[in-house]
Image: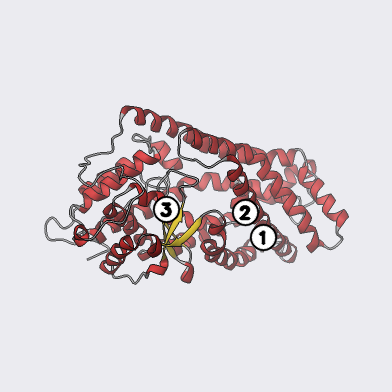
Amino acid sequence: MGTICAAMVLSVYAARAGAQWAPARSVPPQAAHAATQPESPRASAPVTPANAVVTAYTLPPQLYRKARNLSRIFFAFDLIAGLYGLLILWLILHWRIAPRYRDWAERIFSRRSAQALIFAPLLLLTIDLFELPAGVFEQWELRRYGLSIQRWVSWGVDWGKQEILTLIAGTILVAIFYAVVRKSPRRWWLYFWVAVLPIATFLIFLQPIVVDPLFHKFEPLQRKDPALTVQLERMARRAGLDIPPNRMYWMGAAAKSTELNAYVTGLGSSKRIVVWDTTIAKMTTPQIVFVVGHEMGHYVLHHVPKGAAILAVGTLVAFFLIYASIGWMLRRWGEDWRIRGVEDWASLAALLLLLGILSFISDPVANAVSRHFEHQADQFGLEVTHGLTPDSGEVAAQAFETIGIVDLADPRPSRVQIILTYDHPSLPERIHFALHYDPWAHGGHGEFVH
C-alpha cells in the first residue's frame, strides 16, 4: 500500500517494523555443543564459512560497486518517493478529485454511513494507483540487482491482494473517523485515537495468522529443520525463555527473493519468530542461531509492545497537530478545493496530506528509535550465545558479513543517509560492535543475560 495510506491505517503495519530484522540482520551463534550435533541439511554452502575470519565489513571490488550504486539509488528513491506521495495528495486536492468522489457517493446513497463504501475505496485506490509507478520502479531495481526473483505476474497478484486488504481496513477506519468527527467536532482527534488503538492492536495480532500467509508459505521450523530447532530451544533456555517450537516458523521466501531475513511478529498467542528459508540455506547453523538470538532479544526486551506504545503516543501528537492545522488549511484553500469542512468526506485528502507531512518529518526520529532497539537486540544476541558458541562474536560478525554480501548492504553509508533512512545500525557498525563487545573480559557479565 502507498506510504500515505499506510499512515492512515496507522500502526497496523508500522508497529511490526520495529521488531523486524530488515536491512542488516544479526544472526545468533550456536550452542557450545553444536559441534557435536549433526548440522541441518543446507540447500547450498554457507556464504561465509565457519572458519572465515572477519575483521571488518569488506566486499570484493565488483560487489562493492554494486552495493554502493544500489545504496545511492534507494537513498534517492526513499526521499523522492516520500515527496512524490505528498505531491500526489496535493494534486488530488488541486484537481478536486475527492469532491467528485464525494458527489458520486452522495448521489448513490442518501445514508452517510453507506457513502463511505463508495468514497473511501475510490480515493484510496486512486492514491495507490498514482503511487504504483514507484512500486514498479522499486521492484525493477531489485530484480536488476538480483535481490528479487519474483515474476511480474506474481508481483502484480501480491499488489492486488495488498490493495484489497488496504481498501477494507481503510474504508472501516475512514467510516469510523468521520462518524467521530460529526459526533465531536472539537475532540475528534482524541476520540478517534482511542477508537483506533484496539483496532490496530487486533490487526497486529491477526497479521501473522491471516495476512502474512496470503503472501508466503509458513511451516513449523521443527518440521523443516528439526536439528536447527533443537539448537534454538537450547539457546532459548539459556536466555531463560520458554519459546516452544510451535512459536518458531520457517518461511518460504526463495520463490520471490534472494535476500536474508528473520523477524519477530504478532502479539500474545500470535507472537512468533520467523526465519526465511534463504537464511537457512546461506548461513551455518551457529550463524542462524545468532540471528534468532537477535530476534529473541526483541521478544525478551518487549520491543513490539514498546514500539507500539511509542507509536501510539506519536500518533496522538500527530492527530492533535492535524486538528490544530486542518481548520487553518481549509479556511485558506478549502473553497478552491471544494471542501465544505472537516466533516466533509472530501477533507480526507487534506487530512492525509497533513499526516503525510508529519510522517515525513518524523521518520528520522522513528528510525533512531528503531536503530536503538536493533542495537539492543544485537547485544542480546551476543550475550545469549556467549558461552554456548565458541568465538560467538566472530560468528556474529560472519553472520553480518553474509547479510552484507547477499543483500548488497552499503559498506560506507553517509551519516545523513543513516539518520534519514536507516532503521537498523549500518553493517560496518554492527560488525565492529560484534567483534569488540566483551563485558566478560574482566569478570563482568552481560546487561541482559547474566
Which residue matches tag 1? 173
Give the Cα separation between the discs numbered 1 and 3: 32 Å
> In the drawing, does residue 260 fall left or right of residue 227?
right
Query: What percent of the width, then of the height, locates residue 347?
Result: 73, 50
Give the Cα separation between the discs numbered 1 and 2: 8 Å
Nearer to us in this view, 216 or 82: 216
Say which quarter of the image contains residue 307: bottom left
Do labels 1 and 3 touch, CB within 8 Å? no
Which residue matches tag 2? 8
Compared with 157, 179 (above or below) is below
Which tag, 1 or 3, sits closer to the chain's start? Answer: 1
Query: What percent of the width, then of the height, locates residue 26?
Result: 33, 51
Which residue matches tag 3? 276
Which residue is drawn at the image coordinates 36% and 69% (left, top)? 243
Q: Mark 1, residues whose alpha carbon is within 10 Å: few (<14), some, or many (≥20)?
A: many
Do labels 1 and 2 touch, CB within 8 Å? yes
Is label 1 or label 3 in front? 3
Which amino acid type is shown beneath numbered disc 3?
A: Trp
Query: What percent of the width, then of the height, locates residue 326?
Result: 68, 50
Q: Mark 3, residues whose alpha carbon is within 10 Å: few (<14), some, or many (≥20)?
A: many
Secondary element type, mark 2:
helix
